[in-house]
Image (cartoon, rainbow, N blue to C red):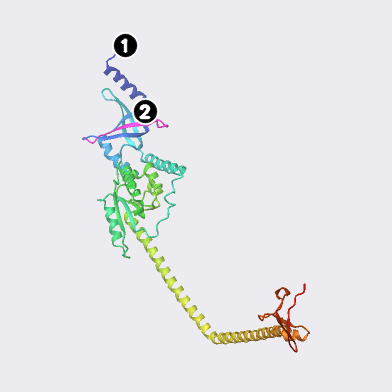
Amino acid sequence: METLTLFELNERVHEAIAEGLPDEYWVRAEMSSVNVNAAGHCYIELVQKHPSGSGMVAKARATIWRARFCMLKPYFEQATGQAFTAGISVQLLVTVEFHELYGLSFIVEDIDPTYTLGDMAARRREILLRLEQEGTIDLNKELPMPLVPRRVAVISSETAAGYGDFCHQLATNAYGFVFSLGLFPAVMQGDAVESTVISALDAIAAEEEKWDVVVIIRGGGAASDLVGFDTYLLAANCAQFPLPILTGIGHERDTTVLDAVAHTSVKTPTAAAEFLISRMAEAAAQLEHLTDSLAATVAMRITAEKQRLQGLTLRLPAAFALRKANETNAITLRNQRLLTAVSTLMAEQRHRLEVAEKVLAGANPDVILRRGYSITYAPDGHAVRHASELREGDILLSRFADGEAHSIVKIED
């Protein structure tokens, strides 16, 4: 068995690779790190992850020498709108090189921006599809936009020009509308976009009742600055936020995932301000229309009531005369009924008196005496009703129809 020094073995590996892989190859991978040294050379670490996401299946180093890097970097960023940075997928044209001291490396000769564009679009589609499958993609869009969105929670960088433009546009609106603004600062580009915007959303949600709408704005800049707005976590938070979200993140060409899930998306901070102003103007126009309609309705009602009153006034004399005649007839009828009732009552009472007189006449003692009866009075003057009232020797007075007679009581054994 042959014994070789490390250099000799590496030299043979170098020769084998040079002979076995002499051509250029297109390689697809994700850049896990990108470093540019002081000399301007770019060193990249390429990785390929397992489809399940459980780990990496391949890893390699790649180098772009300064002269080529000065051409490829601006070309890639202009074509994709994406910064040449770690975390993105690329398709590189490479040659395979093995150096006895530095080992295996890929030398980058060219880059295909269309692949990265497709990958970025695919990632956006995957996020939107996931949100759609979860049933949250349209939740914020389904919230009612306030008719008067006067209380505005703004998520932006305090020093951003776009924030200044937004505030100026609202403050100088032609209608004189007054807006109440609250700034919730966040980073508007770079890796901190997701975490800081979500933190701002959490702060707004904690005082939800104070705000009508949330506006997320940033100034202009490279399309690569929008990457932070293309994350699932940020999109999910915005889609499920309890207040309508308006985005104006300052790029005319590209639409981010955040734009897709927001209630309303416009291109610039100024456009966001114009949207709020136009919404207030619509409310003012509706209020003016309702005021005019109310005034017209009131005027019509007053006219109708005047006409009705005039009609009543014209009909009043005839109605009064008719009512008077009806009441007169009713009084006459009641009088007639009363007279009839009185007459009937008097006749009945007269008859009763006649009967009573006859009864009284029949009960007159003189009448009874003329019938052959007499009345006997005791010595004390009371009429004797029972024999047991008498005593031996009592002198009685008997009264007859034609005179009186005395008698003495004699009680026989």
Quadrant into which the C terminus falls: bottom right
Q: Which residue occupies 34% across, 24% down?
A: 17
Name the residue carrying label 2: 58
Q: Which residue occupies 45% across, 74% down?
A: 298
Camera-nearest label, 1 or 2: 2
Quadrant into which the N terminus falls: top left
Q: Which amino acid does label 1 sit on?
A: Glu
Is residue 297 visible to us here? yes
Q: Which of 312 and 285 is in front in this view?
A: 312
Was residue 50 drawn as part of the magenta stretch in this picture? Answer: yes
Residue 365 position within the rendered picture, expressed as x and y whole percent measured from the top left: 72, 84
Task: Assess whether mark 2 and mark 1 are in contact (beta carbons under 8 angstroms).
Answer: no
Name the residue carrying label 1: 2
Q: Nearer the viewer, residue 49 or 53?
A: 53
In the figure, residue 57 lies in which quadrant? top left
Height in image: 356 above or below 235? below
Q: What stretch is highlighted in magenta?
A: 39-55
In the figure, residue 367 lies in which quadrant? bottom right
As helix, strand or loop, the secondary structure at mark 1 comes to loop
Q: Which amino acid does label 2 sit on?
A: Ala
Q: Which residue occupies 75% across, 77% down?
A: 410
